[in-house]
Image: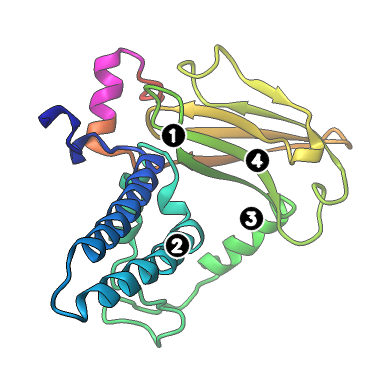
Amino acid sequence: MADSQLQPHKITKPIQLLVVWMIGLVSLVGTFLASARLLDSPSWIRPFLTISAVALVPIFMGLLFLLQTKFRKELQDDPYYSKWLETQRQDFKDFKPENLSGGSPGLTLTGGGTEDLESSRIKRYEHYKGVFLVHSWRPSRIKGQVADVLLKLQQHGEGPLSKGLVERVEYALGPKFFSGSVEKRNQEESFRLEISAYGPMLCLARVHLTDQSTFVLERYVDFAPTTADVDLALTSGRWSADRS
């Protein structure tokens, strides 16, 4: 009998939770209807149990619909999702945009000089022709990996990327990823490169334009792995981040 009982610690996948949800609905409705059939007194108990059994069905189905819509992302079968969600909660705890809230006690506005930061910022736009290296990531679905990462070019305003003037991109992530630099010519995908990694790394990308000129972009690819993730990578002997 003990073996047939529900063991909560073994419910680790969203689909299992939904199955338990439906089993709970069937059990409750069946129990209410069986009780209504067996009980004679008080006189109100039968209609009460019958109405309750019928009402449970739309309530359960409505909550199930809510889970599949509003909370759909929380139901994704991803072993790292809860860690990522907790990281997001911690990073954005008490978030207040300081550019809109009139500043904060720890924010100090400084004046510029002949070569202030704003001038340097504008010059970077000009030097890189509005082309920048960006990345996005998700908790990896590959066993033993920490994150799946997408690297690609992003055009700010109009420039060589949006005008089709980028010929190719060379990526360098370190010898733990590739034995040398890798070249991408998939212009329609903004020269996207897909990798899986155990830890953060510095990526350099040499952008080759059709006029034979080049410039180098850089991106520190961080996805905030937890201590447990790093320990797993180290013990597996397959640490992929470039620590040189």
Query: From the viewer's perspective, is 37 left or right of 175?
Result: left
Considering the image in quadrants, where does the N terminus appear? top left
Percent across and percent down for residue 208 are 77, 33
Give the answer, above or below, for where 221 lies relative to 87: above
Quarter residue 135 falls in:
top right
Q: Which residue is mark 4?
A: 152
Please give the name of the residue rendered at 80% of the width and 37% of the height, measured from the top-left corner.
187
Q: Which mark is residue 124?
A: 3
Q: Which mark is residue 61?
A: 2
Q: Amino acid at mark 2?
A: Met
Query: From the viewer's perspective, is 165 left or right of 67?
Result: right
Q: Nearer the viewer, residue 7 or 138?
A: 7
User: Disc 3 vs disc 2: which is toward the camera?
Assistant: 2
Lower position in the chain sequence, tag 3 or tag 2:
2
> Residue 182 lies in magenta, yes or no?
no
Q: Nearer the viewer, residue 192 or 18?
A: 18
> Residue 234 lies in magenta, yes or no?
yes
Please give the name of the residue rendered at 71% of the width and 58% of the height, measured from the top-left corner.
156
User: Disc 2 vs disc 1: which is toward the camera?
Assistant: 2
Q: Which residue is mark 1?
A: 147
Query: From the viewer's perspective, is 105 left or right of 99?
Result: left
Q: Amino acid at mark 3?
A: Arg
User: Disc 4 vs disc 1: which is toward the camera?
Assistant: 1
Q: Answer whether labels 1 and 3 touch (C-beta < 8 Å).
A: no
Percent across and percent down for residue 134 are 59, 46
Q: What separation in Å lies between label 2 and label 1 (alpha carbons)?
A: 35 Å
Check disc 1: other Cα within 10 Å, few if <14, some if 14-19, many if 20+.
Answer: many
Q: Answer whether labels 4 and 2 touch (C-beta < 8 Å).
A: no
Percent across and percent down for residue 47 are 29, 76
Give the answer, above or below, for where 47 lies relative to 184: below
Q: What separation in Å lies between label 4 and label 2 (alpha carbons)?
A: 42 Å
Lower position in the chain sequence, tag 1 or tag 3:
3
